[in-house]
Amino acid sequence: MESPWDELILSFSRTSMFPFFDIAHYLVSVMALKREPGAVTVACKNPLSSWFTAMLRCFGGGILSCILLAEPPLRFLANSTNILLASSIWYIIFFCPSDLVCQAYSFQPVQLLAAGMKEVTRTWKIVGGVTHANSYYKNGWLVMIAIGWARGAGGSIITTFEQLVKGTWKREADDWLKMSYPSKITLLGSVMFTFQHTKHLAISKHNLMFFYTVFIVATKIAMMVTQTSIVPFAPLEDTLARVLFGNQQLSASGAKKSETKSNGTESSTSKPTAEASDNLQKKHSKTE
Amino acid sequence: MESPWDELILSFSRTSMFPFFDIAHYLVSVMALKREPGAVTVACKNPLSSWFTAMLRCFGGGILSCILLAEPPLRFLANSTNILLASSIWYIIFFCPSDLVCQAYSFQPVQLLAAGMKEVTRTWKIVGGVTHANSYYKNGWLVMIAIGWARGAGGSIITTFEQLVKGTWKREADDWLKMSYPSKITLLGSVMFTFQHTKHLAISKHNLMFFYTVFIVATKIAMMVTQTSIVPFAPLEDTLARVLFGNQQLSASGAKKSETKSNGTESSTSKPTAEASDNLQKKHSKTE
Amino acid sequence: MESPWDELILSFSRTSMFPFFDIAHYLVSVMALKREPGAVTVACKNPLSSWFTAMLRCFGGGILSCILLAEPPLRFLANSTNILLASSIWYIIFFCPSDLVCQAYSFQPVQLLAAGMKEVTRTWKIVGGVTHANSYYKNGWLVMIAIGWARGAGGSIITTFEQLVKGTWKREADDWLKMSYPSKITLLGSVMFTFQHTKHLAISKHNLMFFYTVFIVATKIAMMVTQTSIVPFAPLEDTLARVLFGNQQLSASGAKKSETKSNGTESSTSKPTAEASDNLQKKHSKTE
């Protein structure tokens, strides 16, 4: 039977991202870029570099998945409409007289709305990535997970690369050595959508899309309202880690050993424990 | 009507780059590599690494455009003739007894001739890149601009990557934070040829090629003769920047703010202004 | 005539790498990873990152050749069986209670056997790379050499990239400024197999495979038994270098000059002379 509820979810899963959700995504990404120290200076000194950085923030996930599948990384430039949209948003945000946009954006509900809509685009990206990867490798479910993950949260890796080349990179490697919350949630979603696609998960795609979207939007907004970074499945993670890799004392001793041993290791391994609070507020002013 | 003038330009636009202009390009590139301190040492200690670096300098633009279009970056190795040509030039320059080539090259007119011919190859590369990109994306004019730019001036980016991997890289990132003059002129040319290709610029291709080539060769030679770096359209740039991104005082204040704020930013943004003299001597004591 | 000797070699050259030799390769690679300081800590703190690093070590050569030929770098994920194999080996090595595997591996004969079998896989990789590249560029023998080399010894370059992004990278760039012994031997093999493939080397492929494998296995085991790094063709190299690039005194003087000049050069050029013993033991605990 076709209940109105199903129809609602179905129509939701067919929503087009194009005008409004994309705008929200670009808005959040570019605002996060502007809040980084020095970004305004770069924008005035060398607008092209700033524009390029903004584009990488907006389309990073797609670029990464293109690289991983050996498709032209420049494909995102072929979609002139979205480029124009993102560019105008970048221009308004950086060069609007008397920072009207930023002042409007600093209004809490606007941030909540934009962040929520950005999270919605994440679901669509993951689904697109999984479906796209499936067209390459019929039953390469690992590839599907990887591409879905790259589309959804790969922007930060591209940003890391770009900062590496530009030389403005503080050795953090958060997304490598300690996955940020968006990365984790995106990985979970990518796994779920992949298993749904390979029929290992007995749920219809539009239902999964709806519930996953509701979940990430709710958690994101909750994390923004209560300034703490609540992690819904932290206990589950801990138990899983204890069962699979169950040797925390070894890790602690290893950490000490490595700290005494080499600098490069110490700077990378002991960061999570040291700068937890720092990471926290960073996580809010950071896009994927 | 077919005036002799048109015939001249037409035949000019059909000139083949292969033997002589390519040689000039390789000569200038490898000489620039040899003048970097430590390059000779590397060439003697590990010829293969030096040869690889030289090839990257000679074919960097093509490699970058291949990467951006997801074509095999090794394609340049398939053209054995050019590889052989560049390799022999590299060998002669680095291992010629009593540095005959370098002494001949230090003769001013030779440098002028070689530099001029190298600039000619730039035009051909841009045109080739624009046409090649058009075969991928019919009306992706942004892609065409990017590929033309990459072919014409992308060598420096590839070199940056290579130095990054080799570890001999001082955080300058000039071509990112402050576009060099060749990058600017190449970007302008790429835009012009793209618009000519998409029929937005009412000028025949061979005319544009001729005038653009004359312009870049003239400016290049003028910059070499008068040791100053004259920038023909600096005023135009300034007015454009003032109209579009017209907030220099903001940039100044932002620069101050960022300097006080964080180190990473300071090292990247205030470099041009603050560490000019430092950069100068760094440029002399730079290794390959 | 078909002597039993020929049959033996032929059957040898048709040996499948899949179950056992691949296991040996994964075992050696992951053990080398575990011996790096801090690796155990990372594995406990962030298993995913450690798993990813291990996969890069195991499949790095294939990934690099995929990148160089513009094939999907994620293809290695499509081969689920090998991924599963390598993952289980990674899991056993890192999380086996009371380090049974490591204790077994520290037993000398086991190491010799594993290292020998790993060298066998090197031959197969080179041959595969050369044949694969030939399917792209009919007579691009430079591409064939490069791909064969990348498949055989490219893992270290991929690892360098990964460490670069993760920030845990000590500026060594050994494989760039001073080729390690495995790189040299792989390059030699790649050249030989390419010339055999282009019929410039009058020897049947299975003979060449057999003799090359015997050679690299013997040298590898000899280097492991006698803790010295014997280099079989060092004199040949020296004579070749003296004939082609015959200016050792220039190199020496240049080395001194550069050492006094800048740190970047000193750390890269004076490494071979300074840290020979260090490099030695590093070379044994290092995979390509």
Image (tube, coloured by chain):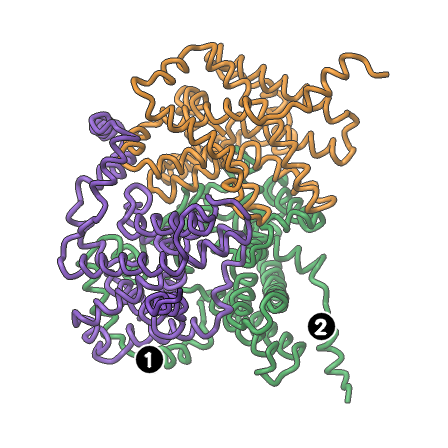
Chain colours: A purple, B green, C orange
As helix, strand or loop, the secondary structure at mark 2 comes to: helix
Judging depth in this view, the residue of C173 and A245 nearest the camera is: A245
| Chain to which mark 1 belongs | B
Q: Residues within 10 Å of mark 2 (few under 14, many from 20)?
A: some
Can you see residue C249? yes
Q: Is residue A45 visible?
A: no
User: Where does residue A231 sit, x and y in percent of width and height?
Assistant: 20, 48
Question: What whole-number distance in Å separates the C-alpha atoms at marks 1 and 2?
Answer: 39 Å
**Height in image: C248 above or below A179?**
above
Q: Nearer the viewer, residue A198 or C103?
A: A198
Q: Which residue is mark 2?
A: B12
Q: Is residue C283 left or right of residue A258?
A: right
Name the element at disc 1: helix
Q: Callout 2, which amino acid? A: Phe
Q: Which callout, 1 or 2, points to the residue nearer the camera? A: 1
**Tag of residue B242:** 1
Tag 1 near tag 2, CB within 8 Å: no
Position of A100 compared to C208: left or right? left
Mark 1 or mark 2: whose residue is earlier in sequence: 2
Could you say where residue A138 lies in the image, as x and y percent from the top left?
A: 55, 48
Q: Residues within 10 Å of mark 1 (few under 14, many from 20)?
A: few
Task: Report the residue that reaches farthest toward the front.
Answer: A1
- Please give the chain letter of the residue carrying mark 2: B
* Vertical position of residue A97 compared to residue A30: above or below: below
Q: Are marks 1 and 2 on the same chain?
A: yes
Residue closer to the observer: B279 or A281: A281
The residue nearer to you, when weighing B169 against A204, is A204
Left or right: A133 in relation to A43: right
